[in-house]
């Protein structure tokens, strides 16, 4: 069985996919392969392509690693986007050559999957360690020069969790490294607890890998409850009422904004439930998770996109391979009738 | 030139006084409606709200739509208030007629057009708002110092403790004290004390400044003109450091209480008939003298840029100008060669967008008013809107003048900070974090998958008003999409820009359209 850090709790294996999503995933994969044949490739596409193959066929089928060798490596460094993929955006050439923590982790994970023990973990550990900043966090300052305060906090925790996973595999979490990294990612100054489910999931995941999950901030139960507000089922990644102007400190006007539930976020919530201390609350949240799983079982296509206030045009993606794989997993967890 | 008419009497008779419509602004879909009673008075109508509330308003039975008035509706569409939410009925707005504009010539233009539309007893209140942090340093502090020197013969007095200048705090004060502004130096209490200690002085300074500005374009203090100043608590909006400005200029109209719905209807019917290119708008309120795209003055642009006073920049016509078939090829001093169409019809579309660009375009307005007789400095042609109609009409306008490959350099989607969490989740759905660009994060978003996910939203927004037909943005410029830009505040909106070379051709024509019937020679002062 295969696991991926993006998808907590999921054992990736053949037969996981709910039948309602099979055709979508097959078409998505075919489309990705067709573009990849032309050199139009992104690390995120390779990853999703392999995830699809594992859940559809039980193992990787396409030579994604070969494609990455050809299009997503520069001087031994993994890239996020191929040159041709970069042309999907106009005049983005100067920005598209990126070696991000995500791209490094993706390359490492796929190579580990393909080569097993032959994978040179140390090489990837060195690449992520080179991303360690003066503030002690690991993130893509070379790709995005934005100051720490304005960076999205999900980047900080996700990069730390992915890096920690690589460092663990490379046996490079000795000495004070774990506690130093853990202290930084638990710091309320550097990475304040804002109540975003995914961000907190990656923080907890990083702290677990680093062996210091006791440093996880308290109060996650309230955040989980807030992210369920205004939603009949499931959870949003964030609470509408938590939208606060970064400069003004004042609440944003959100009365016309609508949260959406997401299978991926529900998986992250599921992981975070272990940090809910109050048994009654935990039971209630577990019941909500079950209700959501059963809702997806009965309505597998209910994976919405955002919209801008009243305008009924999808703002961003609704279902993606990652969302439907998570939805499929949740559906297998439905206990209620 | 008369392009059409607003047939207010026949319209109100047909709908039996019930004016309804819907408006989508800032991605909010809302309705307005009002029932009017009306009676004839020679060439005018006297109208009132049927429920007896509101003002009695005089309005012509038939209003001639010339270039200026059509442009005014475009201007109001960009800068005017659409209304505020009715607290008693969700989804309904109560329109109030007010207008945000700082540039003094445009203020005068708007005042004149309001008087044309509503020839009765209307009143104007000009309100100048400013963050009081403006007076803490620099230019503002100098003004405050000059005020104290002149009135009491001293320097600016030191700021006293808050409990002395404001012994009793109201709810807004308490809220202010609780707000956190990481970028601002100094405690909120001290800032609030500064605000209350100097509030009166700051108001006097601002009001005098506004009065002088208005007088310079011929708007003098009088019974129907009132000037007020309003100060915001320091650093409340926009200003992030002492001396920083966050000025806002509003025009509020009195004597028109209750007529906002009718005014909005006029504006929307003008816009809708231009978009659909129909001679009569759907409710019959607007009747053009022909198919909109076929009416209006036909300009020979070779002649315009050779001889017309408006066809000048810095008191000179283009350096080179030649007719090549149905095009002209020209070059301004210190600029590049440009090809444009030989003839241009100043049709309602062109006029409406001229006004809308004056409101919403990225070009500094002051530059437009001085370019005929002075060096305009660097100019840029750009446009931002969250509404597909505005994007479509602006692109149609540019394509009337330039070949389509020159009209758009690139376009992007700007997303305000309120919607950053939505962008983050969009990235997560692809398994990615969101990486921003630029030091403060408002550069090109680095995560391509997020930008690509938002592209289709933007194209669909552009298509939305066209009843199934593809928009120009999709048809001609879909591949010019550059990125998402996380920036500032507000809903997601489409932003495109074109070569600055086009400015020197487009802007003179824009100014001629709006002011050609009012000011004969723009190299002389506007509204002397």
Image: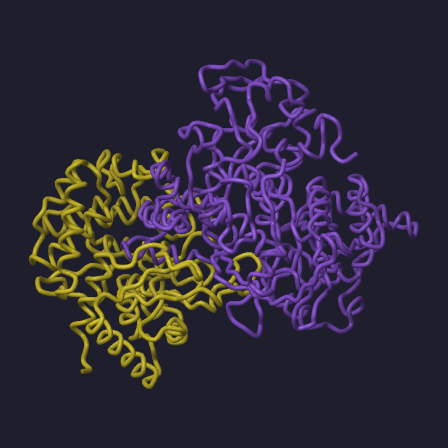
**Figure quadrant of the N terminus of chain B:** top right
Give the x, y percent position of residue A134: 42, 48
Q: Quadrant of residue B85?
A: bottom right
Image coords of residue B374 (percent x, y): 69, 25
What percent of the width, then of the height, locates residue A6? 25, 59
Q: Is residue B242 visible?
A: no
- Residue at x-position 70% and y-position 64%: B189
Q: Is residue B509 visible?
A: yes
Left or right: B312 as drawn, with respect to A303: right
The answer to whether B245 is drawn above or below residue A188 in the figure is above
Q: Residue at x 80, y 66 (%)?
A: B165
Question: Which chain: purple?
Answer: B
Residue at 25 percent across and 46 percent down: it is: A104
Residue B162 image-quadrant placement: bottom right
Question: Which percent across, then down, holds residue B340?
Answer: 48, 23
Residue A15 in the figure: left or right of residue A325:
left
Q: Colour of chain A?
A: yellow
Q: Is residue B501 above or below residue B363?
A: above
Q: How is the image coloured?
A: by chain
Taking the spot 31% from the left edge, 79% from the top edge, the residue there is A285
Q: Quadrant of the C terminus of chain B?
A: top right
Question: Which of the pair B443/A175 is nearer the observer?
Answer: B443
Total numbered badges shown on the rendered structure: 0
């Amino acid at each position: 069985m295969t696991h991926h850090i993006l998808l907590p709790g999921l054992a990736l294996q053949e037969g996981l996919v709910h039948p309602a999503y099979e055709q979508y995933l097959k078409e998505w994969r075919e489309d990705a392969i067709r573009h990849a044949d032309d050199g139009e490739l992104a690390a995120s596409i390779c990853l999703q392509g392999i995830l699809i193959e594992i859940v559809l066929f039980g193992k990787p089928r396409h030579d994604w690693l070969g494609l990455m060798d050809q299009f997503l490596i520069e001087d031994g460094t993994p890239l996020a986007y191929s040159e041709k993929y970069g042309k999907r955006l106009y005049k983005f050439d100067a920005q598209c050559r990126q070696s991000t923590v995500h791209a490094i982790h993706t390359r490492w994970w796929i190579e580990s999957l393909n080569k097993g023990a032959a994978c040179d973990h140390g090489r990837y550990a060195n690449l992520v360690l080179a991303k360690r900043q003066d503030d002690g966090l690991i993130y893509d300052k070379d790709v995005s020069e934005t100051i720490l305060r304005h960076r999205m906090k999900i980047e900080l925790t996700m990069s730390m969790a992915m890096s920690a996973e690589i460092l663990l595999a490379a046996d490079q979490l000795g000495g004070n490294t774990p506690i130093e990294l853990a202290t930084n990612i638990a710091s309320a100054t550097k990475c304040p607890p804002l109540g975003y489910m995914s961000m907190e999931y990656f923080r907890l995941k990083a702290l677990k890998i680093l062996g210091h999950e006791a440093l996880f901030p308290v109060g996650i139960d309230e955040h989980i409850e807030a992210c369920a507000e205004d939603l009949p089922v499931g959870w949003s990644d964030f609470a509408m009422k938590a939208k606060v102007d970064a400069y003004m400190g004042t609440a944003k006007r959100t009365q016309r904004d609508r949260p959406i539930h997401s299978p991926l976020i529900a998986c992250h919530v599921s992981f975070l439930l272990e940090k809910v201390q109050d048994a009654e609350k935990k039971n209630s949240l577990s019941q909500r998770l079950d209700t959501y799983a059963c809702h997806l079982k009965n309505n597998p296509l209910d994976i919405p996109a955002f919209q801008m206030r009243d305008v009924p045009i999808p703002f961003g993606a609704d279902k993606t391979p990652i969302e439907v794989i998570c939805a499929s997993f949740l559906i297998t967890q439905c206990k209620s009738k | 030139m008369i392009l059409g008419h607003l047939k207010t009497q026949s319209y109100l008779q047909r709908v039996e006084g019930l004016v309804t419509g819907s408006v989508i602004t800032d991605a909010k879909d809302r309705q307005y409606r009002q029932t009017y009673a009306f009676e004839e008075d020679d060439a005018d109508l006297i109208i009132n709200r049927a429920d007896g509330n509101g003002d009695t308003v005089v309005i012509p039975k038939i209003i001639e739509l010339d270039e200026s008035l059509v442009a005014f509706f475009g201007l109001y569409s960009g800068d005017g208030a659409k209304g505020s939410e009715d607290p008693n009925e969700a989804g309904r707005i109560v329109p109030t007629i007010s207008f945000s504009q700082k540039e003094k010539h445009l203020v005068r233009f708007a005042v004149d057009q309001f008087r044309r539309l509503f020839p009765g007893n209307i009143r104007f209140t000009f309100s100048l708002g400013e963050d009081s942090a403006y007076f803490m340093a620099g230019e503002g502090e100098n003004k405050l110092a000059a005020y104290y020197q002149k009135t009491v013969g001293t320097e600016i007095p030191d700021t006293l403790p808050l409990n002395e200048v404001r012994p009793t705090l109201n709810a807004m004060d308490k809220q202010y004290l609780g707000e956190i502004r990481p970028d601002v130096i100094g405690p909120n209490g001290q800032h609030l004390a500064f605000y209350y200690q100097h509030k009166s002085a700051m108001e006097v300074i601002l009001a005098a400044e506004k009065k002088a500005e208005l007088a310079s374009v011929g708007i003098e203090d009088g019974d129907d003109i009132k000037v007020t100043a309003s100060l915001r608590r320091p650093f409340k909006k926009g200003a992030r450091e002492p001396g920083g400005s966050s000025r806002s200029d509003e025009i509020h109209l009195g004597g028109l209480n209750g007529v906002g719905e009718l005014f909005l209807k006029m504006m929307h019917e003008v816009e809708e008939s231009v978009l659909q290119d129909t001679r009569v708008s759907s409710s019959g309120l607007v009747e053009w003298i022909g198919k909109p795209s076929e009416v209006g003055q036909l300009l020979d642009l070779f002649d315009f840029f050779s001889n017309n006073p408006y066809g000048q920049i810095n008191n000179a016509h283009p350096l080179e100008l030649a007719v090549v078939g149905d095009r002209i090829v020209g070059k301004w001093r210190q600029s590049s060669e440009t090809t444009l169409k030989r003839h241009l019809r100043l049709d309602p579309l062109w006029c409406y967008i001229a006004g809308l660009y004056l409101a919403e375009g990225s070009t500094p307005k002051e530059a437009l008013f001085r370019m005929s007789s002075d060096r305009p400095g660097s100019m840029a042609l750009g446009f931002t809107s969250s509404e597909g109609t505005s994007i479509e009409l602006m692109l149609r306008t540019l394509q009337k003048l330039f070949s389509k490959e020159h009209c758009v350099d690139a376009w992007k989607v700007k997303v305000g900070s309120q919607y950053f969490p939505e962008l983050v989740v969009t990235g997560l759905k692809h398994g990615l974090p969101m990486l921003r660009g630029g030091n403060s994060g408002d550069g090109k978003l680095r995560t391509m998958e997020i930008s690509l996910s938002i592209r289709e939203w933007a194209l669909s927004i552009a298509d939305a008003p066209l009843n199934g037909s593809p928009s120009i943005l999709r048809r001609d410029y879909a591949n010019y999409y550059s990125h998402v830009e996380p920036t500032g505040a507000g809903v997601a909106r489409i932003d495109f820009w074109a070569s600055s070379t086009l400015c020197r051709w487009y802007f003179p024509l824009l100014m001629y359209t709006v002011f050609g019937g009012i000011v004969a020679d723009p190299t002389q002062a506007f509204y002397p």
